[in-house]
Image (cartoon, helix red, strand yellow):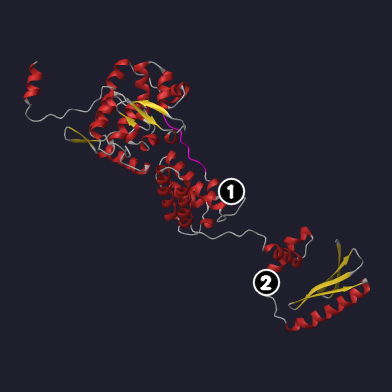
Amino acid sequence: MKTKRIEVKEGNVSVPIYEFSDGRFCVDTLLGETRRRITRTSLAAAKIEARRLIAQIASGRAHEKRMTLAEVEDYRLAKDKLAPFGVSLLGAIEEWVAGRGKIPRIIPKTAAEVVEEFLTSKRVEGVSFFHLEDRKYRMNKFAAAFPGHIDQISTHEIEVWLNGLGIGGRTRNNYRNAVLQLFRYARGKRYLPRNEPTAVEDVASANTGEGAIEIYTPQELRLLLSHAPVKLLPFLAIGAFAGLRSQEIMRLDWSEIRFEQHFIEVAAAKAKTASRRLAPLLPALAAWLLPLRQKTGHVVGYTRNDMLCEARQRHCKSGIKVRGEVFEFRWKPNALRHSYASYRLADIKDAARVALEMGNSPAMLFRNYRELVTEKQAAEWFAVLPEIKRSAKPTPKEIARQAA
């Protein structure tokens, strides 16, 4: 029902009259804390009631508490903000109060509470062990840095935290993606405002542009493998002689290395491309893995990528000794996979086959992994074998074999 507003004013007091389309007139105002609504059939009668209420309001104001300067200023600013819309302050307040119960409220949760709930949901979903471990590590680290409510964390604070981790661009993006997943989960659970971007979405991704593709020489590989700790050795050997991706190696189980059939099965659930493939178990790789062989269990002794990276850094910086001196080995990003592609292609000269072994297309193989090497260098690479430890005194059998 449409209404028309008429103001009856005396001095600095005014009372509104609303004219309804059916011919009735309603005086509607507050008298103290009591709402007064009086309906009359004519405008003249309604004005009489309005003036009577104005007189009551004016007489009662002598006993009311005077407004402070701050309250007067708030009232003035509110009136100015409402002026373009033609809405009274009282009308705006009434509309806001009426809709208050319909506004979806945010459920207060700390970042740590949301992390715990998120990880529980992922366990129920049955995500992979390694994915869950990765999310657990990164998100718990985030929650430790932000002990307050998740809806109070700003974009700037997240950027400062990421920049302070002292990590490379790719790893920084991995952290950002994990936290973004957490915030989107929180938004879906009404721990953050619905239909609004989260604070993480305004955090720019880091530039992961990598430099020139690098590979290792056979001499460098021998140095790297010969001094590697047992927990790290399978990771390095499989990368060098089978070209599997880092995450694929970490997810690998001993039961998937088929020594008798001479291949490694990369299950679809563990492959980046989500498709099953078979990588060759070459003699050099089998020689390095056989002494470590187990029936089942994780091939690599680390369950989280950050733990693996720390172990690798320790090995390269202080774990390699040459003639009694510590040798700092320079780690080259993704160089084991680059090296395998380059040496394998030079060895068998079949790009399609190498691409299939690595889970790539031939075009990607040439674009991202291949470095020109010679057949001789390839032969040297795949001839890097474990050194046979000899006893101080040769056995009779060894003496006889040497004599022959």
Q: Position of residue 96 (x, y in %)?
A: 70, 63
Residue 346 in the figure: left or right of residue 181? left
Q: Residue at x 7, y 26 (%)?
A: 395
Q: Is residue 276 left or right of residue 91?
A: left
Please state the horizontal and vertical placement of residue 384, each as a whole percent of the image: 25, 24
Identified at 42% across, 30% down, the residue is 211
Q: In the rendered structure, which disc, 2 or 1, sits on the residue that comes first in sequence?
A: 2
- Amino acid type of the residue tagged 2 in the rendering: Glu
Q: Secondary structure at mark 2?
A: helix
Which numbered marker is on residue 197? 1
Question: Which range of residues does the magenta coloring cover?
Answer: 204-211
Rate crowding at label 1 as few (under 14), some (14 to 19) or many (20 or more) other CA atoms within 10 Å: few
Up the image or down, 278 lies above or below 19; here it is above
Q: Nearer the viewer, mark 2 or mark 1?
A: 1
- Queried whether the magenta region covers residue 91, the answer comes back as no
Q: Amino acid at mark 1?
A: Pro
Return the residue at label 2.
71
Q: CA distance from mark 2 to mark 1?
A: 35 Å
Res. 310 image quadrant? top left
- How many other residues sit within 10 Å of disc 2, few (<14), some (14-19) or many (≥20)? few
Q: What percent of the width, then of the height, locates residue 36?
A: 80, 76
Figure quadrant of the C terminus: top left
Looking at the image, which residue is at 93% across and 73% down?
44
